[in-house]
Image (spheres, coloured by chain):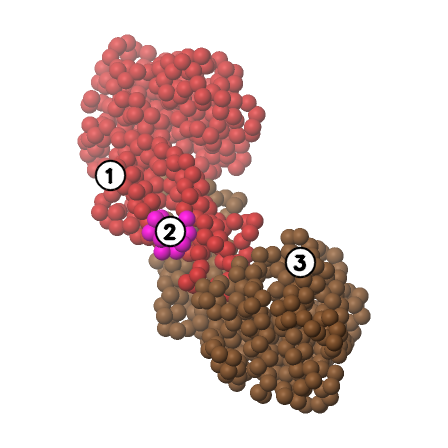
Chain colours: A red, B brown
Amino acid sequence: MNAVSTLSAAALAERIFGTVGGLTRDDPGVSRESFGAGESRAMEAVAAIAAELGLACETDAYKNLWMRLPEDARAAPPVILGSHLDSVPHGGNFDGLAGVAAAMMALARYRGRAAEAPPLRALALRGEESAWYGKAYLGSLALTGKLGGEALALRHRDGHGTLGGAMAMLGIDTEAIRAGKPLLAPGDAAAYLELHIEQGPVMTARGWPVTAVTGIRGNLRHNAVRCTGEAGHSGAVPRWLRKDAVLAVAELLSRMDEHWRVLLQMGMDLVMTSGICTTSPDSHAVSVIPGEVRFSLEIRSQDAATMERFYDLVREECRAVEKSRGVAFTFDTRIDTAPATMDPAWIARLQAASLRLGSPLETIPSGAGHDAAVFANAGIPAAMVFVRNENGSHNPHEAMDIADFLKGVDLLTEAVRTV
Amino acid sequence: MNAVSTLSAAALAERIFGTVGGLTRDDPGVSRESFGAGESRAMEAVAAIAAELGLACETDAYKNLWMRLPEDARAAPPVILGSHLDSVPHGGNFDGLAGVAAAMMALARYRGRAAEAPPLRALALRGEESAWYGKAYLGSLALTGKLGGEALALRHRDGHGTLGGAMAMLGIDTEAIRAGKPLLAPGDAAAYLELHIEQGPVMTARGWPVTAVTGIRGNLRHNAVRCTGEAGHSGAVPRWLRKDAVLAVAELLSRMDEHWRVLLQMGMDLVMTSGICTTSPDSHAVSVIPGEVRFSLEIRSQDAATMERFYDLVREECRAVEKSRGVAFTFDTRIDTAPATMDPAWIARLQAASLRLGSPLETIPSGAGHDAAVFANAGIPAAMVFVRNENGSHNPHEAMDIADFLKGVDLLTEAVRTV
């Protein structure tokens, strides 16, 4: 036995996180650029540790890393355990890497007893973060044949170079990507299971170390809705002759906030955000009635019909406010991302495994997007395990306890045992 | 009789507006800089027409222009008819000038019959607009000894030169201004009457050609209130864990808007404006829960107690929203400008005069500030006549009908006859 394979689970986890984090440090935080140097360094480090653990590694034509038990030669569609290795610029060390670490650790636990579980593969994907090329899930979309040629022309955030260029530098077969050639078709995998840190505060607030994800919220966005009223002297125009864009938007958002509250009470899954909301910097003034407000609107839900109905309500309330306040709302292009449902059978397996390990498993929706949504929407049964994490993600302050992470690894290991 | 004194009233009005407007044209609109060249050109042109009308002109130590009937040698405190001659950059031709034109026309109608009215003076003031030096009512404040030495250091909007420098160039005794020496004490004038275009849309909407002003609204301002919540992932944080600054401000403003509506129904005089309202341009994003909003708040009323009570309500609602939404409101320095009440006896005289001329006179508050407020707050009974005007003021699109203006001149003339 080599040094790594004698480590305790906690020490092994620290070893993986410490090694990869150290190689990709970019204070504050880590930078593992999609299809770039940091991501490749992370992948090489993961492959080296996998080899030390006695796993067989191979790289596919799109330069994702696959790991398997060398003694497992079964041809049946495997259960894939995986996540991504890239990060946002100056991001946290656990977003993505935790899922890859869990996958290789769970897989390694079956060394010498491969027949106890279905065929298993650990997968380290590239390019999940939208921060580098403005589009997310690049690696999993390519793998399932859905990235498309247009994405190859996406420019890097610095304005220099394209995604296609970066892929070519890595030796990726971009012509196959352009042709939409999948490396993984629906029948090729029994399931895709992904462990990931939670990117919201719910599990910390509830005291849940691990959960199963019910679904991944889709979203419906308008980046810039305009409310046009009429500017005027703030002293000289009385209320009944005003067309105040700020008060119109305030009323609209307050009405929607109240509808949101009621719909949550009715059990619907829904979040609503207006992250950008501003009067016009060119013309606004303390003593001028605001004639224009520009605001973003984002609706997310696990259920496409809920998003659609809430959106209809937004448009209806806009018409009501237009009528009562004499303003006009102008909507820019609507952008849709479909929600994904996690596989109910796999959620049930995760819950049963958790009970066997001694505790019930709570479920929550994922508000953020994940590669698991791509696999699910490509026809591969997918499920996710969330691990408690403080301070959100996409920042250097992610805080995941190794004890919580190991509960997640135990859960994955147990869940695949009984398939 | 000379050419001017044989003109019809309408032709005389057109002559005054045409001459002064032509001399100060600065497309689009007119520019008559406070204590600057355009204002001085306007003053010389007004003096020249006044002389043609047979009025005696003199300039005081602060370079305001006074006109009187040459045959009126009475020493009793006069009724002053006046307004200002400056304009905002690229402003309209009637804001200010209409009141000076009305004053000289009303005065000229008493030529040869001075004893029918009290002693009268027409006054053309300088420096009413805040656009040039960031402070309003410079001329009337100086005249009443209230400008103060600090104002002399105010910088021109271009950043070059000061108010004191501009005054010195005109030969104004700035040391007297610094010492707070009034040229007009409370006992020196029986009243100050000012005709002015309305700067809001009420009279056009109501179909009123002229009105008497009940009072001039004061205002209470915060230029920048901060609402601080907590930024977070727009998909991953559920409603109950959010501290959304946009929804908090929306709720606050909607609540205040509703209170405002109710208080108006109760007969209070009140306007409320949040002219600037914005998420932080440095950190806002479509998919980030807004952690901060900055907004301005302005409350105006003719009644200081109404402003104070509404302000208390704002602070109380802020505390309620802080409690329910976990946000915090931080207020910058509060800035107060006192309201001014127009003299009830003079309002009654204007109304009686209007009835004698054949129609009742409606009253409205002035939302915008005027020199009349300075005279009123200095202890000189003040009243104002508003003339209907489309398209607001401080822009080249002011639109006053000469027929409406002449109704105002008739009203002023009749009102002073019976003192």
Residue bearing mark 3: B30
- Dot 3: chain letter: B
- Which residue does the numbered mark 1 point to in the structure image? A362
Report the quarter where the C terminus of chain B lies.
bottom right
Instruction: Residue A323: say if magenta.
Output: yes
Residue B37 percent location from the top left of the image: 75, 62
Q: Give the percent coordinates (x, y) of residue B386.
A: 54, 71
Q: Nearer the viewer, residue A202 or B48?
A: B48
Question: Which secondary structure, mark 1?
Answer: strand
Q: Earlier in the sequence, mark 2 or mark 1?
A: 2
Q: Which sits in the foreground, A164 or A124? A: A164
Instruction: Name above or below for residue A119 compared with residue B52.
Output: above
Asked if residue A180 lies left or right of residue B98, the reply is: left
Q: Is residue B288 magenta?
A: no
> SS class of the residue under badge 2?
helix
Q: Quadrant of residue A103?
A: top left
Q: Quadrant of residue B395?
A: bottom right
Give me the residue at 41% from left, 59% from top: B253
Do callouts 3 and 2 point to residues on the same chain?
no
Instruction: Compare residues B196 and A237 and report the one nearer the observer.
Output: B196
**Residue type marked 2:** Glu
Q: Which residue is mark 2?
A: A322
Mark 1 residue type:
Glu
In the image, A181: left or right of B358? left
- What is the chain identity of the residue bearing mark 2? A
Q: Which residues are magenta?
A: A318-328
